[in-house]
Image (spheres, coloured by chain):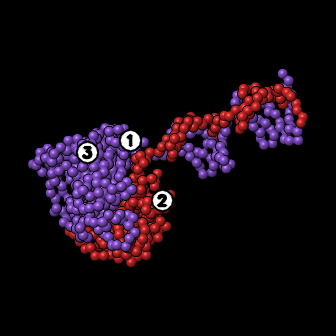
Chain colours: A purple, B red
Amino acid sequence: MSKLVVNQIQYSGGATYTLPTSNPSANDQLKTDGSGALGWSGNLTAIKNANGQVTNMPTQVGSNGQTLQSNGSGTLAYGGAPTNPMKVGSTYGYYLADRYEVITSGNTQNFVLSAGGTGQPSSATPFGTNDNYPIGYYFQWLGLGSTGSGNIRIQPLAQNGNPVSGSYSQNAFYRGHYNEQQGLGNSGTSYNEYFNVNFTGMQTQQGNNTLQFTDTGSTTRWGKTAMGEMWIFPGVSYPQYNHWVNYSNTSNNAYKTTYCHMWMQDVMQSSGQGYEYLTQTPWQFEWQNPSGAQFNEGVAELYVLMADNGTYPG
Amino acid sequence: MSRVVVNQLQHNTGGSAPAITWLTADGSSGQKVKSTDTAGTLGFTSDDLPIKTQDGNTTMSFPNSLSATGMSFVDNGSGVFTATAASNPFTINSEQGMRLCDRVDLTTSSPASTINLTVPIAYTTTGSNVLGFDLRFYGLRMANNSNNNGEKIHVTQLTQNGSQLGSGGSNYYTSQRYNLQNNQVSNTYSAQTGTRFRLNNNSDTYNSSAWPITSIFADGTVSSARRGIEGAYYGQFKMYNAYNAKTAASRMVYTSGSSYNDNNEEFTAFQGYVDSSPGHAMGLSLGNGSSYNFCDGLVELYAYFKNGVVS
């Protein structure tokens, strides 16, 4: 085999290259130092983008669970992984489970918010399918308007979509509520299977079907939407819920804000409809507009609190 | 063109330098020259060099595919990364729940007579993307040294740069206030002028000249003169961010001037319109009728966005 032993080689009239003086490792690539001294390169410790911007790798490897982060000076560094503000140790706080944005999703007479997220409850969801796990629900609704007046209510549904209650007699709630118009004296029983969100009419057609969110007109309109919050303990025995709702009705002068606490009748009374319970554990909730009007504005959200052995996304 | 035909090249160092065996076949465009062995036999390759930490001790191995956006690279302690999504409890599938927008902690910041909280530009600069607000305040206390019955806190709608939305001259109606102590309804629906939503009717927030005018949150002194939390507001102002042009959805607040005067425990609700304040609000401001400084407490602004606006 012919071999030329020489320190440098030069393209005729071009650059002069000095040959390497050390052995390479397998797969090392030949490199120049910019002055024509050839050598071997086995790895990169920096990367360059198409604009020539160099990003340096960390000095040393990090610990298990750390993430790569920029240090603001072109060098990657290790840092803590992004944390979940609603998680501490192995326990979780409340999570968004479902959301219906009426204002962009379109008018509807009813809509369902599910503990299983936006997927069908019977299929795999970020929260699993064990209906024993949800131990608390929190609703918030904002600017919820409809095309006509009337009560709005929430029907608890089982995971299979059926109402959790079979008959009124099995699902009597005691409703204790007060509102700014009538004070604490207004309370009563309500033998039904729904969570009645408001005591009187939800709203008035002050704006007809005009959406307040986008209405740029000059016609004077009163607020016609409802907002509120609700907390539900969905125990099969003695479920209870507590909420406030603010809404307007036929004029500018009545029942605009209601604070309401509902629970099973036997909690309030020594006798009544017997031992009250839900026939199944609620897993989803249908917001209903029983007057036939359609929700046409606003947003409603369902947050869920799972048992510690429940399934949370992330 | 001059040419030397030779199989190997070797630096003249007395035999310690490798005898580099020259390329025997051409490569493809863009390929690089590498040594195929430890003896310096050259060949072409399309492989990139591995990426290592600067100390050269650890090869950094990245995931085979990155099919999702917003992923973080999490190390296993040996330089092997997996792409992991940061868990967000207020995002489910393609839907987003409430987001913290702004916060003022008066226990550590300077007292101020006005507290402005706005939607970050990073979230959106389009007002119609913001469906509503939830303003929460805790232990909010004013630094006035006298019993000024009628000191009222109020909320003003803001643009994103912190200026008042609209120029005033507007109207809104205050729903009846409900007083917890007296189990009574007070006030009427008389129109209020200006762009302010007055949260309370007659609460005093500070009633003694002996009480501090700076934060006492961390003050361990047990003294009647440290009863500053008495008279502090806590509450919530929730608002549907309807377009302001003679039309507006309900605004609701529960507010309290605490135990110094139980009569001040009250709910307040609003509805009505702000007719000369066109557009959607991009923030809220807390102020008070006499421009006293807020000197204690915490105020947070949360917002609800249309799906897809915030990640």
Residue A148: % across, % down: 26, 61
Circle on res. A157: 3
Residue A75: % across, % down: 62, 47
Q: Which quarter of the figure has residue B269? A: bottom left
Q: Nearer the viewer, residue A298 or A215?
A: A215
Q: Which quarter of the figure has residue B218? A: bottom left
- Residue A144 vs B111, above or below: the answer is above
Judging by the rendered image, the residue that carries numbered circle 2 is B124
Earlier sequence position, callout 3 versus callout 1:
1
Letter of the chain that mark 3 sits on in the rendering: A
Q: Can you see residue B147?
A: no
Structural crowding at the residue carrying mark 2, measured as other residues with C-alpha within 10 Å and reported as few (<14), some (14–19) or many (≥20): some
A285 horizontally vs A52: left or right: left
Judging by the rendered image, the residue that carries numbered circle 1 is A126
Labels 3 and 1 within one chain: yes
Which quadrant is the N terminus of chain A positioned in?
A: top right
Disc 2/disc 3 C-alpha distance (Å): 36 Å
Q: Residue shown at 35%/63% (left/top)?
A: A211
Residue B22: % across, % down: 79, 29
Q: Residue shown at 76%/27% (left/top)?
A: B41
Q: Which residue is outermost to the right?
A: B2
Disc 3/disc 1 C-alpha distance (Å): 19 Å
- Residue A127 vs A223, above or below: the answer is above
Could you tell me if the residues under marks 1 and 2 are in contact, i.e. CB atoms within 8 Å? no
Q: Which quarter of the figure has residue A5? A: top right
Q: Residue shown at 17%/47% (left/top)?
A: A171
Q: Nearer the viewer, residue B227 or B252?
A: B252
Amino acid type, mark 3: Leu
Amino acid type, mark 1: Pro
- Residue B286 vs A64, above or below: the answer is below
Secondary structure beneath dot 2 equals loop
Secondary structure beneath dot 3 equals strand
